[in-house]
Amino acid sequence: MKIFLTLLLIMLSLSFVMAQETPFKKKYINHTELGALVGRVKYAQGGPDDRVESKVSITAQTFNGIQMSPRLGVGVTVGADWYKTALITPIAAGIRYDLPSRGTARFFALADAGYGFTWLHQDSDGFDTKGGLMINPGIGLRAGKPGASSVTISLTYKRQEAFVKKPAYYTQIKRDEDRVYNRIAIRLGISF
Amino acid sequence: MKTQLLPFIVLVFSIGLFSCNDQCKETRITRRLTPLTRSLTDLRNSVKSETKHELVRPGKIYTKGNYLFINEIKEGIHVVDNSDPANPRFVSFIVIPGNGDIAVRNNILYADSFSDLVALDISDPENAKEVSRVENVFRSGQFDGVGWALLNNTGGPVISIQDYTVDYVTETVTTNCEENWAGNGGWFWNDMLSSKASFSSSGSASSSAQTNGQAGSMARFALYDKYLYTVEQNNMHLFNISNPAQPGDFKTVTTNFNIETIFPYQNKLFLGTTTGMLIFDNANPAEPKQLSAFQHGRACDPVVVHNDIAYVTLRTGSACPGTANQMDLVDVSDATAPKLIKTYQMENPHGLSINFPTLFLCEGDKGLKVFDVKDKMTIDQHLLSFYKDMDAYDVISLGSNLMLIGKDGFYQYDASDPKNLRLLSKIPVKKAVP
């Protein structure tokens, strides 16, 4: 929280200094991030009482695209998410949009939407995991001079669907699971 | 702008962190059993011939001459006139409660009916008649993994059996989004002991002057000389059928294995068990003697034998335990010491049938593979054809006629060119279970 306020103060103080306009030219941009997907799960298996567990997974992704306008970048995001029992490889269309702000620490909005594949996943015997739709919108803060490479921190919401066929127990003839991973993603990254 | 945005972001992510729960719903279709006591007198009186029925849950298949006998699991037998494989004709339905297996010698059909062995005269296939019965020879059994047993609690005469009615229940539970192997009381498998639709080719050993039908590698009944062999759990029963219309309970051979199938080949009996293959010497048909056991992990294992080579398939999947999907070639020229020749990786092999040098192998929902097995060391390089757009559970090859059963029906093919099967007919299955 303190960091946020400090960053905000820096931003406000610098906003008066920044005034330079440069002619815009489309260029290649990259935004690579590494972080954690945090959330929890509440479930009631085998009884009436709910159990709650916290969940943390590692996530990595790289956005490659084109700066279409001074604010808007459009591209493709490829990543990898190591959920507890699924390694999902999302491939998504992404945007990076710089919110109106000045200074060396600026807010930006980011959103990716696509499909998570299970190409790199390996199933336990008897299981068959399929990926599903993925959306990942959120907001971030960029520290660095405009137009140069910057360090980012982002907070996004990530929703990843998956479907798993499971081996059936003795009296079952079919057992499968619809999964929705609802996570907050906290990521650090670099952008250039 | 900034001062408004920041508290908003903090608020949104606080709510997000609080409410971000993974949501996983597991849907299970469970078979629910309700106990039911059935009177043996009622069961014994209900054997009769009726007009034709539709296929609902076909079980094992048996062919004899122009006729095809399709077991309807636990209900009875469909009699099909197959003189024209392009146009099989349902003739009648024989109601036999608790039936799972079939064997035919001359014009006598042997069928199990829960605890009894029933002999029916089928010289008029439209009007089969019970001619005799051996009572209370099978103590217990299973259909699709649902057991039944003779009730014998007071030591008095056995008058009823414990059976179960089955219904299917769909339930949805929330899970922790993990694989939860052992959540439901044990590591059992659904229908490893089931008698699902299955049959395979068989070198049915016919002795002179007697005519037997063709059973499959999944069969629990086998005919040899003047005996009918049946397998049940760890027992092998012998029935004396020197007078085919009057089978007599002759002998019981006990093993330490859970026997699933019996396959007679020359003067040997090959028993498929849940843990391996047993070879019995049957030179004296009244005294089968165990020669050897070829052990493998727990798996489903239809076996066929040709020219001293046993083709054993192992598979995994929802119906079978184990970790192997493969076909083992086992040298059984010395039946006291079977030796593994080579293992071929398969996808999910089910039934198989050999019409040397062609081997038909069902790969479940992956399809049907046709191999040339002349060179036993390079079978994998001699895949003649692979039909992927079908569900193949089991197959039997009789000359150029190939019969195949899958989840949706019973098919017959002209296989005179193994590279190019020609569909002759299809009997659709009316699906009853999900």
Image (spheres, coloured by chain):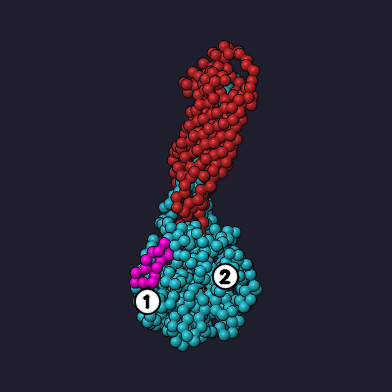
Residue type at mark 2 is Leu
Q: Tell me where residue B343 sits by quadrant.
A: bottom left
Circle 2 chain: B
Q: Residue at x 44, y 75 (%)?
A: B265
Q: Is residue B387 above or below residue A120?
A: below
Tell me if residue A81 is in the magenta stretch. Answer: no
Count of residue discs: 2
Q: Quadrant of residue A161?
A: top right
Q: Amino acid at mark 1?
A: Asp
Provide the letter of the chain coloured cyan. Answer: B
The label shown at residue B402 is: 2
Q: Is residue B340 magenta?
A: yes
- The C terminus of chain B: image quadrant: bottom right
**Which residue is located at x 48 percent, y 62 percent?**
B379
Please identify the residue farthest to the top as the structure is shown.
A17
* Image location (x, y in percent) of residue B262: 44, 73
Q: Which chain is red?
A: A
Q: Are marks 2 and 1 on the same chain?
A: yes
Determine the CA span between mark 2 and mark 1: 30 Å
Question: Could you tell me which residue is drawn at 52 percent across and 64 percent down?
Answer: B371
Given residues B128 and B159, the one toward you in this image is B128
Quadrant occupied by the N terminus of chain B = top right
Numbered disc 1: what chain? B
Secondary structure at badge 1 equals strand
Along the line of sight, which residue is nearer the eye, B396 or B130?
B396
Which residue corresponds to mark 1? B281
- Please state if B79 lies on the left or on the right of B337 as rendered: right
The span picked out in magenta is B325-342
Q: Position of residue B250 (x, y in %)?
A: 39, 83
Q: Nearer the viewer, residue B278 or A28?
A: A28
Relative image position of residue B344 (x, y in whole percent):
45, 59
Query: x and y percent of residue B381 in the render?
Result: 50, 59
